[in-house]
Image (cartoon, rainbow, N blue to C red):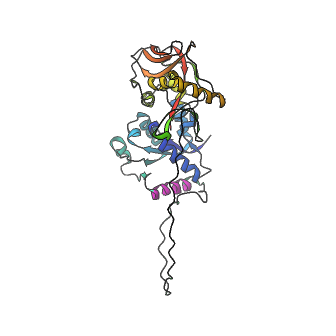
Amino acid sequence: MKYDVFISYSRADFDEVNGLVEMLKRQIPSLSVWFDITGIESGDEFEEKIISAIDQSKYVLFALSDNSISSSWAKDEVMYAKNTDKKVVPVLLRGAQLKGWFLFKFGRVDCIDSTIQLQVDKLVNNISKWTNKPVASGTQGAVYKEKVPPAPPTSEPAKSQPKVEKKPQPEPIAKTYKVGDYYDNGIKQGVVFDVWDGGRHGKIVSLDQGEGLQWDSKTFALRVGTDSQTDGKYNTDKVLTRRDTDKFPAFAWCIHKGRAWYLPAINELKLLLLNDSVHDVVNETLARQGGIKLCSKGEWEYYWSSTEYDRSCAWFVNMRIGDTRNFYKSDNYYVRAVSAF
């Protein structure tokens, strides 16, 4: 399959980049975009998939941020794209600044600033022209056009228009959630197991689960540095900086669901599995939605967390005794993915 645009970005910027991609597809409906939330399937060789996708794309849109600048993957993608004569379009995300190798490569290039509407419109206009695919009429946001000089004034005096008092519009009410609610934003679906900020933000657990997966499938023990007990996204991002992501099956299973998903840290897993009031209400919703229920206390089952114990072992939840333990990373346990909203 051929693509118009390949998106190069850091997983840490998923929400912002996903919004940019959705905007492009909304304004140019026939645009084909390779965006690895759906581009990589379980079992595929990550590096080969990236190379193939760039080869099949006409243009590369590089979402430039402090996260992507520090990513070795991003640098490799940009270098490969340039070496294969692809046009690379850098887009500055919120607060990003060119520096180091990327300043050297793009210092004289017209970068698109995603925080300036006129430049975003220019990006849409350019991609539409390059790909020969029209912009949809009636889409939000003006498409960039060359400035047209104002019409000369007429001899007739302008007629004054009556002032119309604008009524203040009420602020949109943000949707709130509670533990046990079903969450579906059109991109990801799950069951809420943690909330804060009055229920406007929280975390969801996936409707399905991985079974019989190793934390680390390599034949030798290696310290990875996923030592956070509270932030599984931090731990998963640590694994994503490596070139051998596929050698970490528990993490890979979560990542392949989309860049917004991650393997929970041990404290996140404890809240989900060992807090009875959370565990039971989540299971009720999973059953109603046709998902796979969480294992219950007393069952001889175990769930991996993303929290490392040492070079050989990682933390997991032991459902049989209702507590946490650490054991060899080569063992095969259940895996559940979580995501923040």
Can residue 29 be spotted in the picture? yes
Residue at the left extreme? Answer: 100
Relative height, residue 239 to residue 148 (above, below) = above
Residue at the bottom extreme? Answer: 155
The x and y percentages for residue 255 are: 52, 30
The x and y percentages for residue 133 are: 60, 54
Number of dots carrying numbers: 0
The x and y percentages for residue 252 are: 52, 26
Relative height, residue 77 to residue 111 (above, below) = above
Residue at the front extreme? Answer: 277
Q: What range is drawn magenta here?
A: 117-129
* Residue nearer the viewer, 227 or 162: 162
* Residue nearer the viewer, 273 or 76: 273
Would you say residue 260 sits in the magenta stretch?
Answer: no
**Left of 79 or right of it: where is 183?**
right
Identify which residue is drawn at 50% across, 21% down.
274
* Residue nearer the viewer, 234 or 229: 229
The x and y percentages for residue 94 are: 41, 47
Identify which residue is drawn at 40% across, 35% down.
71
Can residue 85 be spotted in the picture? no
Looking at the rendering, in which quadrant would you find the N terminus? Answer: top right
Would you say residue 125 sits in the magenta stretch?
Answer: yes
**Magenta-drawn stretch, dominant element (helix, strand or loop):** helix
